[in-house]
Amino acid sequence: MLLTQAQIRGLNIVSNDVRDGWRPTSYDATVGDIIIGGKILDDNSYVIPPRGVAWVVSKETFALPDKVTGLATLRTTWTHKGVLALNVGVVDPSWTGSLSTALVNLSKTPFPIAKGDPFFRVVFNRHRASGATPSGQPRDAYLRSTTERSALFARTFLDMDSLSSEIAKEILGFPKIAVVIGVVAVLISIAAIFAPIGFSTWSEYRQIPVKYDQLSKRVDDINTDSINKKISDLERELAVLRALDLERQKPAQVRTVRQYAPPHIVVNANQNALP
């Protein structure tokens, strides 16, 4: 059976309580001490960075009878802002002492906490006698043991700094000879890719003067052949013109005799036609 505020008060379950902490069927535990990295802060407040971890111990002391079991949950307001409590849950029957938890800021923004802030909402259920063995610690002893537990935790969730270092060590922590071999293998691979390209480019560059000379010679040969051909053509045309001119200068009678003489008569330019 869930206990009401009046029933909780009547059983004197909550000590060192604050008036604003009471609810109709629950009580809101408030921050009494803040512990960071195994040290109790003297300051009244602390800002939990993103992925940061902070331990808080309640200002109140709870004394549960054998017939009562408590249930502590982080305030909904805090969970909606990205804060998670690592150890929440059942408060055993016959427990006497404070309550504590590790707060983790899973949001992207810093989260401020201060002494006196309500953080746990605790409800109490009555049941038959459980026969539970009384347990708990005085506040000073409980605060000391919580401080020791907090020292075992990293100051950031999953200890990102340590995790990054371990990953880097796993990746880069090979023996030096292995690193050297790996570097050499990479250099050889690069050389295998670019060496043929470089050699081909160098060879092509070396051939440029030779190819230039060959091309120049071919141009010269083409020009020489073309000029010689034109000269030969001109000489043939000139010879034809000379022959025509000589033919034109011969006496008209000779040209006529040659023109009309029968094939069996031989005509001499200086003689008459003979049978």
Image: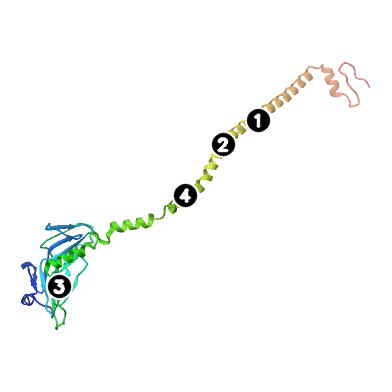
Q: Which residue is mark 3?
A: 136
Please identify the quadrant where the N terminus is shown.
Answer: bottom left
Q: Which residue is mark 4?
A: 184
CA distance for labels 4 and 1: 54 Å
SS category of the residue bearing label 3: strand
CA distance for labels 3 and 1: 114 Å
Q: Which residue is mark 1?
A: 221
Q: Which residue is mark 2?
A: 206
Measured from the top left, where is residue 149 in percent x and y? Answer: 21, 65
SS category of the residue bearing label 1: helix
Q: Nearer the viewer, mark 4 or mark 1?
A: 4
- Looking at the image, is 141 positioned above or below residue 202? below
- What residue appears at the point 86 percent right and 21 percent down from the top-left corner? 257
- Looking at the image, is 204 positioned above or below residue 220? below
SS category of the residue bearing label 2: helix
SS category of the residue bearing label 4: helix
Q: Earlier in the sequence, mark 4 or mark 3?
A: 3
Mark 1, Cα crowd under 10 Å, few <14 / some 14-19 / many 20+, is: few
Three-letter code, disc 3:
Gly
CB atoms at circles 4 and 2 under 8 Å apart? no
Q: Nearer the viewer, mark 1 or mark 2?
A: 2
Q: Nearer the viewer, mark 4 or mark 2?
A: 4
